Amino acid sequence: VDRPVDPASGLVVRYRFVVGDDLPDACLEGLRAGVERPWLYEVRLNGHAVPVEGAPRWFDEEMRALPVGEHARRGENVLSLEARPFTVFCEIMPVYLIGEFGLLPAARGFRVGAAAPLRLGDWTALGLPFYPDAVRYTFRFRQPQEGGLALRLTGWQGSVAVVHLDGQ
């Protein structure tokens, strides 16, 4: 790790994403990019410098949520990370697009578009194929006066389900 680095070395990594015409302006302007160790790079979106200093921590100690919405556009976008010189800490890691949007299947990969209203069903079809958090569904019903109550989560594919009945 402490080995000398050639000052003429470097690295450029480019990440591409496509924004659809249906993404509302406020959602486009609010886009952020989750980048690991962004202080090691000159970060640019579509050729424009993206500020790194003061960006809030996101996900873990080494990640920052960089504001990129100012330079994002509908159509193809290119986020580039350029390191001069290259160091062992310049690992090529995933970059995460953060914001209020849905991901819709495209000919190649996904297109960033308007989020669909949340409803029961496959999260991929709702534009949430990589959503990492929890969702709460609420239903009201009347229980018959007699008999028990059974809950079946048919077709449900998840890791945990927590069921509350009357707050219990």
Image (tube, rainbow, N blue to C red):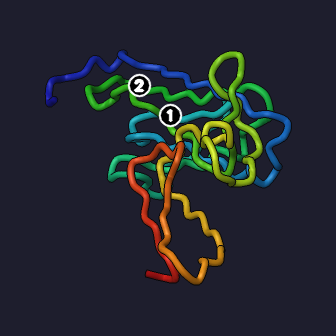
Q: Secondary structure at mark 1?
A: strand
Q: Residue at x 65, y 78 (%)?
A: 142
Q: Residue at x 56, y 25 (%)?
A: 15
**Residue closest to the eye, 5 or 96:** 96
**Residue closest to the eye, 114 or 92:** 114
Residues at discs 1 and 2 in contact (Cβ within 8 Å): yes
Question: Residue 86: image x %, image y %?
Answer: 34, 23
Question: Residue 130: image x %, image y %?
Answer: 53, 39
Q: Residue at x 61, y 78 (%)?
A: 144
Question: Which residue lies under the disc numbered 1?
Answer: 42
Q: Residues within 10 Å of mark 1 (few under 14, many from 20)?
A: some
**Earlier-in-chain disc, 1 versus 2:** 1
**Residue closest to the eye, 127 or 91:** 127
- Quadrant the N terminus occupies: top left
Left or right of 42, for residue 61: left
Q: Secondary structure at mark 2?
A: loop
Question: Residue 51: image x %, image y %?
Answer: 56, 47
- Quadrant the C terminus occupies: bottom left
Question: Which residue lies under the disc numbered 2?
Answer: 84
Determine the image quadrant of residue 122: top right
In the rendered image, the vertical position of residue 46 relative to residue 27, given as above or below: above
Q: Amino acid at mark 1?
A: Glu
Determine the image quadrant of residue 112: top right
